[in-house]
Image (cartoon, rainbow, N blue to C red):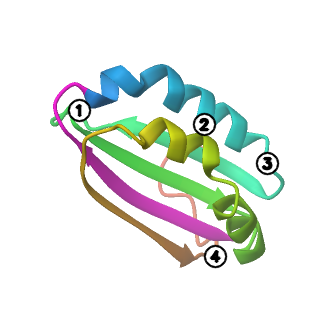
Amino acid sequence: MMIVAGTARFAAGEIDRLQSQLAAWVAEVRRRDGCIAYNYARDIDDPDLLHIVEQWRDDAAIDAHMSDMGVLMNALAGAKMEALNVRAYEADYKRTLMGE
């Protein structure tokens, strides 16, 4: 399994403006082959920071996803994004730390 984690920092108000487009994008990506989980979450202490957390079956699924990012790129074309950092990691399940 592959884990993708990162952050995107936007100018003030940009996440609010993009909310519906980002929600539609997340819903679309969650239906893609090899997508186990795909989530964006706004930081509770910083409303202009978006956390990105994804789980993919394998590298090939990530590559297929990355080759079809047009909808997101169109949504972000006019956005004031100040920083972006997204990385992929290979992962193996170790143990449950909390909950079921």
Is 96 drawn above or below residue 81 in the view shown?
A: below
Residue 66 at x, y = what percent? 64, 63
> Callout 2: helix, strand or loop?
helix
- How far apart, in angstroms, are the residues tagged by discs 2 and 4? 24 Å
Q: In the rendered structure, which disc, 4 or 3, sits on the residue that comes first in sequence?
A: 3
User: For the residue carrying disc 4, how many other residues have a C-alpha within 10 Å: few (<14), some (14-19), or many (20+)?
Assistant: few
Q: Quadrant of the C terminus?
A: top right
Q: CA distance from mark 3 to mark 1?
A: 28 Å
Q: Earlier in the sequence, mark 3 or mark 1?
A: 3
Query: Callout 3: 10 Å neighbours few (<14), some, many (20+)?
Result: few
Please tell me how many numbered marks the rendered image carries.
Answer: 4
Find disc 2 in the rendering and name its residue: 26
Q: Nearer the viewer, residue 100 or 84?
A: 84
Amino acid under disc 4: Asp
Q: Which residues are magenta?
A: 1-13
At numbered mark 4, what does the secondary structure look like: helix, strand or loop?
A: loop
Amino acid residing under circle 2: Val
Numbered disc in front, either 4 or 3 = 3
Q: Which residue is mark 1?
A: 44
Pointer 2 or 3: first along the chain: 2
Q: Residue at x 52, y 73 (%)?
A: 88
Q: Amino acid at mark 3?
A: Arg
Q: Does the segment drawn in magenta span residue 29?
A: no
